[in-house]
Image (spheres, grey):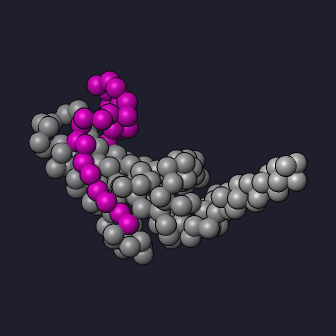
Amino acid sequence: MKNSFKLLSAVSAIFLLAACENTGAGNGGVGGSGFNSSDASSAAAAQTDLEQNVGDRVFFGYDSSVLTSEGQATLDKQAAWLKQNPAVSVTVEGHCDERGTREYNIALGERRASAAKSYLTSAGVESNRVAVISYGKERPAVTGSSEESFSQNRRAVTVVGN
């Protein structure tokens, strides 16, 4: 009985170690991590890596969906990160400030998200890995009615997972 318990413990330890092994594609991405996009904890780790080491958002001018040079630089880093993490898919969220009608801002947010997606795909990211959605003015990052607040809400945010 005692030997059976030891054997069972050893086998359990082997299975536990095997379960911890990362066999997903995409090892060695920016920040030194590989991510399995089907695992929620891996998606959270990938999102954190994207935010902290690459940058997850680009900003736009008033009533514009034209990418700035700073936005293009951020998207270049995102494209490199996505190429290094081929198992990761993303959604680009388009956002607007509070000015304008709901309908107008939904369309403008869509154009912003699509501009970011187009840039990523032109940089070599597969189109099927990048979805877009517009939230218009419904999800502000910053509350307030100042130009400083408005400028933080005119954005496209790249989010891991679809």
Q: Nearer the viewer, residue 11 or 117?
A: 11
Q: Nearer the viewer, residue 90 or 124?
A: 90
The residue drawn where x is 29% and y is 56% is 132
The residue drawn where x is 49% and y is 49% is 40
Tell me residue 21's x, y (percent): 68, 62
Q: Nearer the viewer, residue 48 or 63?
A: 48
Tell me residue 7's x, y (percent): 82, 56
Number of callouts in the render? 0
Q: Is residue 49 left or right of residue 92?
A: right
Tell me residue 113's x, y (percent): 29, 55
Farthest-out residue, right: 2
Assess whether residue 135 is covered by the magenta stretch. yes
Q: Which residues are magenta?
A: 129-154
Q: In which quarter of the view is residue 111 placed?
A: bottom left
Residue 17 visible (yes or no): no
Quadrant of image for the C terminus: bottom left
Identify whether 102 is placed above or below 20: above
Assess whether residue 158 is covered by the magenta stretch. no
The residue drawn where x is 88% and y is 53% is 3
Identify whether 60 is placed above or below 79: above
The residue drawn where x is 88% and y is 48% is 2
Q: Is residue 27 left or right of residue 111?
A: right
Q: Nearer the viewer, residue 77 or 87?
A: 87
